[in-house]
């Protein structure tokens, strides 16, 4: 039931993103062509890439939500990280492409030959900023609620588009005021923002792919909780790792060596259950019991 609810909400967010970006990219492209604005056309291409990224998100979250099977006993959560990596790659390629054409225009040096964009492009940039920022907060809210790295990557894709529209707004405004070189410079700034967002998304996904440990504060919380359980006399080892958006825990606890196997098993079971009940993100816990040795 939980996976079905996750898929339903994730799909809803992605569909909103796809429809919104299709409409916005078409309007920005139209405004860019009519107003002869290279920056606005670049911004439209960026929005169009968001449509592709949202489709990847839908595919990624659907595959990652599949239940464990014989070939994949630990589930499919990491495939959502793969989707985030693909998004980061698409974002980086888009940004570098925009940057390349901007540098070509700047290096050309014939700034007086650059076309002055019309005011329609300026209006389109302002509308894009408002719409994309709203889409960022909407998608980010669901990403946090669903704890989805792929949806969070899509949210930052929206934010990078909003930032690129700000760059386009400044560049188009500067060009209208008589500084046509400002428009390709704006496209170059857009490239930097997009590539930075791509790097952050890629780094976060890779961290979750390579079993990075949880932060120290979270591990300290686990230790405090475990030490409060009846029969636990100490903690000899604690290892945590991120598996997609889930957490795996390996812990060695100390208990009275004179207790029976059943009694020590009950202590381990108590530790296991309290951690799973307290932290829903924990998918698997391995508890090992050592005989307590006074130090």
Image: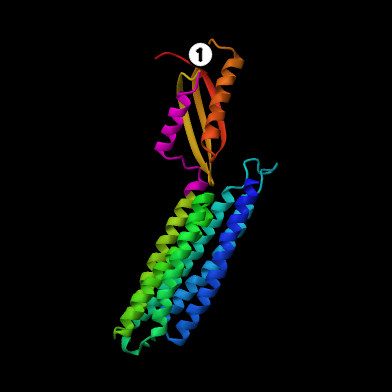
| Residue lying farthest to the left in this orientation | 178
Which secondary structure type mostly characterizes the magenta part of the structure? Answer: helix
Q: Is residue 229 a member of the stretch shown in magenta?
A: yes
Q: Is residue 109 visible?
A: no
24 relative to 113, above or below: above
**Image quarter (top left, top right, bottom left or bottom right) of the C terminus:** top left
- Find numbered disc 1 in the image and state the secondary structure of the residue it sits on: loop
Res 174 quadrant in image: bottom left
At which x and y percent is residue 154? 50, 60
223 relative to 126, above or below: above
At which x and y percent is residue 103? 37, 76
82 relative to 27, above or below: above
In the image, 62 versus 192, the foreground residue is: 62
116 left or right of 146? left
| Residue lying farthest to the bottom in this orientation | 113
Colour logic = rainbow
At which x and y percent is residue 259? 55, 12
| Residue lying farthest to the top in this orientation | 258
Identify the residue at image location x=46%, y=56%: 201
Q: Is residue 111 a member of the stretch shown in magenta?
A: no
Q: In this figure, which residue is indicated by the disc labeled 1?
A: 256
219 relative to 148, above or below: above
In the image, 15 versus 171, the foreground residue is: 15
Q: Which residues are magenta?
A: 207-230
Q: Is residue 2 visible?
A: yes
Callout 1 crowding tier (Cα within 10 Å): few <14, some 14–19, many ≥20: some
């Amino acid at each position: 039931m939980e996976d079905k609810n996750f898929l339903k909400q994730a799909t809803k967010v992605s569909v909103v993103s796809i429809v919104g970006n299709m409409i916005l990219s078409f309007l920005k492209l139209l405004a860019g062509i009519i107003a002869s604005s290279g920056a606005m056309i670049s911004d439209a291409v960026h929005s169009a890439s968001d449509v592709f990224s949202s489709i990847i998100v839908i595919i990624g979250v659907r595959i990652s939500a599949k239940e464990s099977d014989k070939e994949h006993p630990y589930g499919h959560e990491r495939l959502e990280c793969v989707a985030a990596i693909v998004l980061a790659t698409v974002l980086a390629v888009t940004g570098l492409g925009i940057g390349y054409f901007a540098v070509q225009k700047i290096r050309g040096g014939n700034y007086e030959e650059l076309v002055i964009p019309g005011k329609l492009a300026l209006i389109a940039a302002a509308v894009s900023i408002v719409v994309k920022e709203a889409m960022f907060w909407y998608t980010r809210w669901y990403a946090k609620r669903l704890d989805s790295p792929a949806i969070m990557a899509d949210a930052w894709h929206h934010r990078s588009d909003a930032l690129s529209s700000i760059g386009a707004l400044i560049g188009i405004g500067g060009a209208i005021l008589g500084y046509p070189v400002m428009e390709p410079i704006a496209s170059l700034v857009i490239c930097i923002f997009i590539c930075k967002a791509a790097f952050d998304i890629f780094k976060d996904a890779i961290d979750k792919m390579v079993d990075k440990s949880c932060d120290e504060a979270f591990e300290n919380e686990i230790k405090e909780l475990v030490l409060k359980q009846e029969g636990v006399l100490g903690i000899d080892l604690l290892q945590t790792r991120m598996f997609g958006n889930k957490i795996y825990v390996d812990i060695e606890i100390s208990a009275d060596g004179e207790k029976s196997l059943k009694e020590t098993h009950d202590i381990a079971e108590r530790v296991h259950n309290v951690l799973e009940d307290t932290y829903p993100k924990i998918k698997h816990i391995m508890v090992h019991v050592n005989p307590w040795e006074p130090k």
